[in-house]
Each structure stands twice: as structure tokens, then as C-alpha cells.
Amino acid sequence: MSIELHAFDTPNGRKISVALEEMGLPYTVKVIDIRNQGQFTPEFLAISPNNKIPAIVDHDGPDGQPISVFESGAILLYLGEKTGMFLPSDLRARVPVLEWLMFQMGGFGPMPGQVHYFAGLENPQEQRFALERYMQETRRLYGVMERRLADREYFADQLSVADFAILGWAWRHERHKVDLADFPNVQRWYRMMMARPAVQRGFEVKLS
């Protein structure tokens, strides 16, 4: 049975569509139109109590029983465990995957997300301080990634769910007001990731 992906066309939604394509899992999409408060319906809240996309329902979950999972990081870990792909079983190899996944969830998502919000304000006075603050932190996070990728192809040495998580947000670098040419290692990684056929399919899936 296929997995239901409840999502919208956002970085967090794209993380999961990319992962599902890379893992070769069958899935169907249920678009949750967050522009029209679709995330507040009782049906969606039953699987995502924090009223945030994405969420999944796996009808072939543990012991063959259905399971729902919310929060994109938790979904990536669940899918990695389910398939045995992109999430090493060896603890030493798994630690950097977890580190860089948490880096994305705690920083490289919330900070550029604030840039998205404040860049959309029309009042320049409201924009100025917030944009300076969040753009500075966003560029710092790109710098952290730049140093990490200086001597490796992927964030955790081998392709992992951490790369899918970070890619979902790097995809919006133009909205972050970031030129990837300023971060050549990140640019190399980004181009390599976006050239993967499964990643391309994940970004082509209609989520809105």
C-alpha cells in the first residue's frame, strides 16, 4: 500500500517528496492548502496536532498496521528506519546524520523562514531590523555548511536524510537573498543533489 503525503509546496514538504522518491516508496499526495487554512481541519489535526505540514500516513506501518507521523524530521527518520536507506545502522555513522538533521530542524529552517516572512512585508521600517537580524544568521548558517562541505561530498559523509532535509531549504536560497556563488562548496553540493533524477522527481510532484 502507498504512503499518503499530506503536504504543500514548501521546503518542509519538498524534503519528504524528495526522500520518498529517493527511497522508491509508492505514495500519493493530499495537498493541504495552507493558504486557505487547510491545516486546521479536524481531519488533518488528527494526524498533525501541531497543524503544520507535512505529515504522512503509512498504511503498511510497523506490524502491518497504519501509522501517522508528523514533523518533517521525524518523518525522515521514520522513512529511513522503514527502508534501511539513507540512515546508517552503525551508531558512529548515524551520529553525523542526526547532528545535521537537527542542525536543519533547529536552525537552517527557522532562520531563513523568518527571512521569507519579513521579506514579504511592505513597510520598509518593519522590514529593516528583522531582515538584518535573520539574514545575518542565515548567512552564518550557510557558512557553517560551507565549512562542513569543504572536504566531503555530503553532510554525513554518505548521502542521508540530513541532505534531503537541508536541500528542502537550500532550494529557497534566492528567497534567503543568498547567492550560492558566495558559498562554493554549498553550491557544488546543491548542484549535485539537484542533478539526481529522484530529487528532480521529488521537486516536480504537484504539492499545490
Image (cartoon, helix red, strand yellow):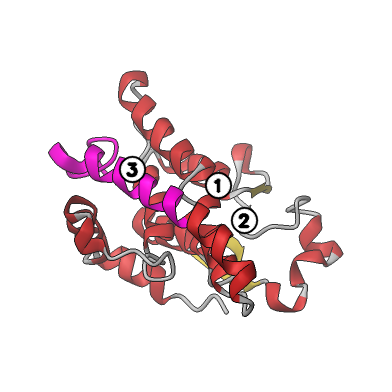
Magenta-span inclusion, residue 61 = no
**Mark 2 belongs to which amino acid?**
Ile
**Mark 3 belongs to which amino acid?**
Ser
**Span colored in magenta:** 135-160
Q: Which mark is first along the chain, 2 or 3?
A: 2
Tag 1 residue: 75
- Label 3 to label 2, Cα distance in Å? 19 Å
- Residue 66's x, y, as percent? 68, 48
- The relative height of residue 59 versus residue 171 in the rendered view (above or below) is above
Tag 3 residue: 160
Q: Which mark is first along the chain, 1 or 2?
A: 2
Tag 2 residue: 56
- 13 or 197: nearer the viewer: 13
Q: Quadrant of residue 204?
A: bottom left
- 179 or 60: nearer the viewer: 179
Residue found 18% across the figure and 44% down from its top: 153
In front: mark 3 or mark 2?
A: 3
- The relative height of residue 166 versus residue 85 in the rendered view (above or below) is below
Q: Secondary structure at mark 2?
A: strand
Q: Can I make out residue 1 in this image? A: no
**Mark 1 belongs to which amino acid?**
Ile
Quadrant in which the C terminus is drawn? bottom right
Q: Which mark is first along the chain, 3 or 1?
A: 1
Q: Magenta region, mostly helix, strand or loop?
A: helix
